[in-house]
Amino acid sequence: QVHLVESGGGLVQAGGSLRLSCVISGSIFSFSMMAWYRQAPGKQRELVAGITSSTITTYADSVKGRFTLSRDNAKNTVYLQMNSLKPEDTAVYYCNAHVMTTATMTYQNYWGRGTQVTVSS
């Protein structure tokens, strides 16, 4: 079993900052791509940022220059630092990871349950 648990969401005023964390636990052999997605009401889930095992990052155009993704492999944790937040960043943010478990020795895709981020104007 693999579990992804997000934290750090909340209510913040426009221009403020939040730092999301995602801890991956379970029978993990290794993990490769880790990412954050978000889903606003009435909209499709979209990729916010992703990071490979070699720490190559990719960002949605809407968050470039404001969000920073990082990972700590020793802690099985990925972080999303969000600065200069805008009301349009309001969404549920989901952690995603490609994890190889000791049981299967194959990579599978896992999701967290999400954390709400609300940015007030």
Image (tube, rainbow, N blue to C red):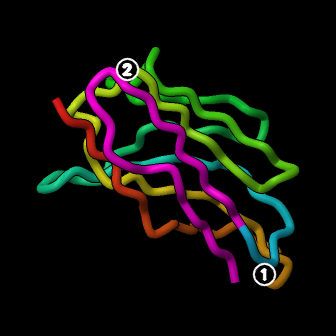
Q: Quadrant of residue 120?
A: top left
Q: Which mark is residue 22?
A: none
Is 13 drawn above or below residue 115 in the view shown? above
Look at the image and give the residue range highlighted in magenta.
1-24
Q: Amino acid at mark 2?
A: Ser
Quarter of the figure that contains the N terminus: bottom right
Tag 2 secondary structure: loop
Residue at the far top: name it.
65
**Res 53 → quadrant:** top right
SS under mark 1: loop
Cα–Cα span, label 2 and label 1: 41 Å
Picture mark count = 2
Which residue is denoted by mark 2 in the rendering? 84
**Residue 55 shown left or right of residue 12 in the figure:** right
The furthest residue to the left: 42
Would you call the spot at circle 1 few (<14 residues within 10 Å), some (14-19), or many (20 or more)? few
Tell me what residue is drawn at x 68 percent, y 29 percent. 56
- Up-down: is 50 above or below 45? above
Q: Which residue is mark 1?
A: 104
Name the magenta segment's main secondary structure.
strand
Q: Position of residue 115 (x, y in %)?
A: 41, 58
Q: Residues within 10 Å of mark 2 (few under 14, many from 20)?
A: some
Q: From the image, state whether disc 2 or disc 1 is nearer to you.
A: 2
Residue at image point 40% right, 43% down = 47
Q: Residue at x 61, y 29 (%)?
A: 57
Q: Quadrant of the C terminus?
A: top left
For the residue pair 117 and 35, the one nearer the viewer reads as 117
Task: Please provide percent x and percent y for residue 84.
Answer: 37, 20
106 lies left or right of 114? right
User: Which label's residue is closer to the chain start, 2 or 1?
Assistant: 2
